[in-house]
Image (spheres, rainbow, N blue to C red):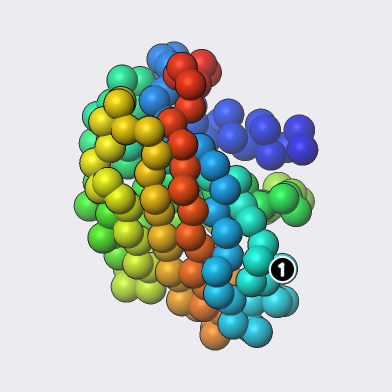
């Protein structure tokens, strides 16, 4: 858990250097996962904690949305869309860190599909719905869809 919290802090530090970040947080649930995902420890019904920091809001990155996921079994991921906006993004930079300190950075295109509603939340937006479908995640044939409703964090996240 300490490692996950350290990773979360480091991930969001990229978003908002010494400022308070404007974020939405909640759980993303694995709605569907093919059997090939079992070897990666991803199964339908699992949940991941998530933090979404839209671009341009107080304390956030000015040019790109940032999305972070934390798996309860010691895995974290940061997603930065190449277009700058997570909604409808297909090209992303995906940085992952595992509990054994293995880090991997992937720049990928074409095997992701994101939907964010509303696509550009403002500081007054109470909740954000996110859906993410990923094909060939971790291994060929591992296709996953995650869905979640994230709520605006009361106050800002101090880093």
Find disc 1 in the rendering and name its residue: 41
Question: Where residue 1 sits: x, y (%)?
Answer: 77, 38
Question: Where residue 75 sits: x, y (%)?
Answer: 66, 52
Q: Residue furthest front?
A: 126
- Please state the total of marks drawn on the protein image: 1
In the rendered image of this protein, does residue 83 appear above or below residue 52?
below
Residue at point 48%, 27% (across, down): 153
In the rendered image of this protein, does residue 19 appear above or below residue 111?
above
Location of residue 152 (image quadrant): top left
Secondary structure found at label 1:
loop
Tell me if I can see residue 104 in this picture: yes
Question: Where residue 29 sits: x, y (%)?
Answer: 57, 59
Residue at point 30%, 25% (across, down): 123
Tell me if I can see residue 95 in this picture: no
Report the side of 72 relative to 150 (left or right).
right
In-front residue for pair 80/51: 51
In-front residue for pair 70/110: 70
Residue at point 72%, 76% (across, down): 39
Report the side of 11 relative to 117 (left or right).
right
The crowding category of the residue bearing disc 1, from other C-alpha atoms within 10 Å (few below 14, some 14 to 19, many at least 20), is: few
In the rendered image of this protein, does residue 69 appear above or below residue 31?
above
Question: Where residue 139 sits: x, y (%)?
Answer: 58, 78
In-front residue for pair 29/5: 29
In-front residue for pair 61/131: 131
Residue at point 55%, 83% (across, down): 140
């Amino acid at each position: 858990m300490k490692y996950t919290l350290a990773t979360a802090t480091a991930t969001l530090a990229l978003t908002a250097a010494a400022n308070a970040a404007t974020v939405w947080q909640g759980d993303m649930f694995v709605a569907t996962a093919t059997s090939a995902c079992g070897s990666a420890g991803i199964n339908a019904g699992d949940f991941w904690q998530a933090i979404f920091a839209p671009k341009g809001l107080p304390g956030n990155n000015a040019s790109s949305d940032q999305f972070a996921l934390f798996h309860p079994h010691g895995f974290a991921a940061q997603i930065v869309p190449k277009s700058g906006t997570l909604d409808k993004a297909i090209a992303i930079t995906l940085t992952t860190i595992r509990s054994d300190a293995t880090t991997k950075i992937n720049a990928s295109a074409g095997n992701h599909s994101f939907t964010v509603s509303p696509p550009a939340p403002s500081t007054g937006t109470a909740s954000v719905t996110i859906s993410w479908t990923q094909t060939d995640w971790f291994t060929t044939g591992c296709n996953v869809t995650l869905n979640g409703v994230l709520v605006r964090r009361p106050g800002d996240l101090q880093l």
